Amino acid sequence: MARVAFLVDEMFEDSEFRVPYDRVRSAGHEAVLVGLAAGKELVGKRGKETIRTERAAEDVSEDDFDAVVIPGGYSPDHVRTSTAAVGLVRNAFNQGKPVAAICHAGWVLAEADIADGRTLTSWPSIKTDLLNAGARWVDREVVEDGNLITSRKPDDLPAFCDALLGQLERGAPARAEPATAPEGTAQEPAPGRAA
């Protein structure tokens, strides 16, 4: 059984939290709600979900978890302002643990300085942010670049969850190579960034 941190704050995208959370639990893993403060009540962006954080990011470490999931919505904009939350993501990534980010959660990857040189996807409006962070951006339902898992939107949740559960069971796949991106979808790094 794996222990998975769900890193959330206010205005998370309801389904991008609920679907992976339920899939992780139904697969027999433990899901832990980690926020900027413990015991904080959070309401989803669409008002369908109300949850309460169990642990504060500053009170946990990457050693406490086997993976980190970051739902989208406006939550990632709050999460990326927390040094402890960003450090949790960076350190989990550096230990080779799955880090799964959907929609606007790519902001947290950029803040953690782990997007550089990686092939990622996201909600289209943060594409430029990821390119400026040195990522290669592609328009796909799910991208696995080593232990980084990214998806674009709620419609991608089945593939996103399958990738996360696959990594929990089998480990991370090999790094994605830019040449494997479908023609016309890979984006060049922003000017001044190394390729």
Image: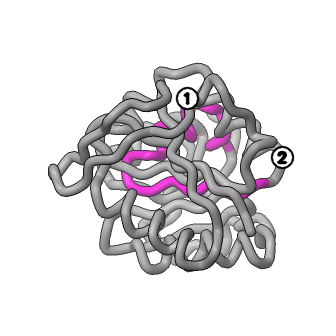
Query: In the image, what residue occupies the spot 47% across and 21% down?
Result: 81
Q: Which picture quadrant has residue 164?
A: bottom right
x, y percentage for residue 58? 63, 23
Q: Earlier in the sequence, mark 1 or mark 2?
A: 1
Q: Is residue 135 above or below residue 156?
A: above
Residue 181 covered by magenta stretch: no
Write the start and end of the magenta stretch as one range.
97-116
Q: Write the residue at 63% across / 56% down.
A: 4
Q: CA distance from mark 1 to mark 2?
A: 20 Å
Figure disc tally: 2
Q: Position of residue 13 (x, y in %)?
A: 29, 52
Q: Position of residue 159 (x, y in %)?
A: 48, 78
Name the residue: 51% across, 39% down: 54
Q: Quadrant of the C terminus?
A: top right
Residue 89 shows up from this direction: yes
Which one is in front, 37 or 185? 37
Q: Residue at x 50, y 46 (%)?
A: 33
Which mark is in front, 1 or 2? 1
- Can you say which quadrant of the picture contains the N terminus? bottom right
Judged from the image, the secondary structure of the residue bearing numbered disc 1 is: strand
104, 27: nearer the viewer: 27
Q: Is residue 84 above or below residue 115?
A: above
User: Which amino acid lies under the numbered mark 2 shown in the image of this protein?
Assistant: Gln
Q: Amino acid at mark 1?
A: Ala
Q: Residues within 10 Å of mark 2 (few under 14, many from 20)?
A: few
Q: For mark 1, what is the residue? A: 56
Q: Which residue is mark 2?
A: 95
